[in-house]
Amino acid sequence: MKKQSVLGSLPGVQVVLFDLGGTLWAPFGEKSGDQVLDFSVAQLIQEIEAVTGVRLCQDSVREKIVINLAGFKPTCLNHGESILDSDSWREVDLYHVISEILHFYCIYTPNESIVCLTDGFADNLSKEYALYSETIDVLSQLKSSGYKMGIVSNTAIPPYIIDRYLAESGILDYIDFKVLSSEVGWRKPHRNIYQEALNRAKVKPENVIFVGDRLLEDVCGPSLMGMHSALIVKESQLTEDLESKQCFIVLNSLNDLVCVDPTTLFH
């Protein structure tokens, strides 16, 4: 008996939405997030000191950046508040973060200089990405099968920098649109970022499957919006920690999306 692909089991699906980091590429390549952040902060400080002559403390600058980047993580929701509507999911503005660091050290520079510093910092955070080996093949198969594809990603990196690396990686040749939190101002799982993706896809939620590697952002949020969802997770990670009231598809790799039977988990 011929095996049916995940998408073959969902005949109403016309659009596939992908998370980016952890799904289509490894955001830091073979390095850790801390290694990339440390290098990016060191480069930022070097640029600021070269222009202004003011000495900065790397630990202090790093701490301010980390606090801002982690600021969107809510400890709890307000009474009766849906995860789709929490104000905690507002995206960080890197330009604002770097402006605050400069002001802390009483450094006042033109906006153009702050933009250059922000872009340099964002580029250093982004350029270590490594494309997963199966990504282009899967995207090519989906494109040939007539699916519309989009990327919906949480990132504080400006869209034009992400575009550069999407083009360099070859991903941009296959996707029809992208929705980044740095563009819309809201991170997954806020409803606004999903709704923007649905608006650009021009289909109903039931005609969409969302594929990603994070339970809250890529399964719970899309499911609450009425989309199908698929979680990429290693078999060794399939434990009781995957607690959800949603029904979702589990993939051991991106390849499973186009070539094997779906495994549906009910929690």
Image (cartoon, rainbow, N blue to C red):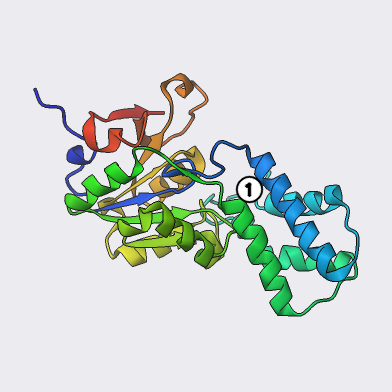
Residue at 51%, 67% in the rendered image = 160
Circle 1 packing at 10 Å, graded few (<14), some (14-19), many (20+), is few
In the rendered image, residue 107, in percent from the top left (x then y), is placed at: 87, 71
As drawn, 105 above or below 81: below
Viewed as shown, does residue 220 lie left or right of 101? left
In the rendered image, residue 15, in percent from the top left (x then y), is placed at: 27, 54
Quadrant occupied by the N terminus:
top left
- Which amino acid type corresponds to the residue marked 1 in the rendered image? Leu
Q: Which quadrant would the C terminus be assigned to in this image?
A: top left
In the rendered image, residue 168, in percent from the top left (x then y), is placed at 43, 56
In the displayed structure image, the side of residue 214 where residue 63 appears, left or right: right
Question: Label 1: which residue?
Answer: 77
User: Residue sitting at 72 percent across and 72 percent down?
Assistant: 114
Q: Residue 87, can we see it?
A: no
Q: Is residue 160 visible?
A: yes
Q: Which residue appears at 62% of the width and 52% of the height?
A: 125
* Residue 225 appears left or right of 111: left
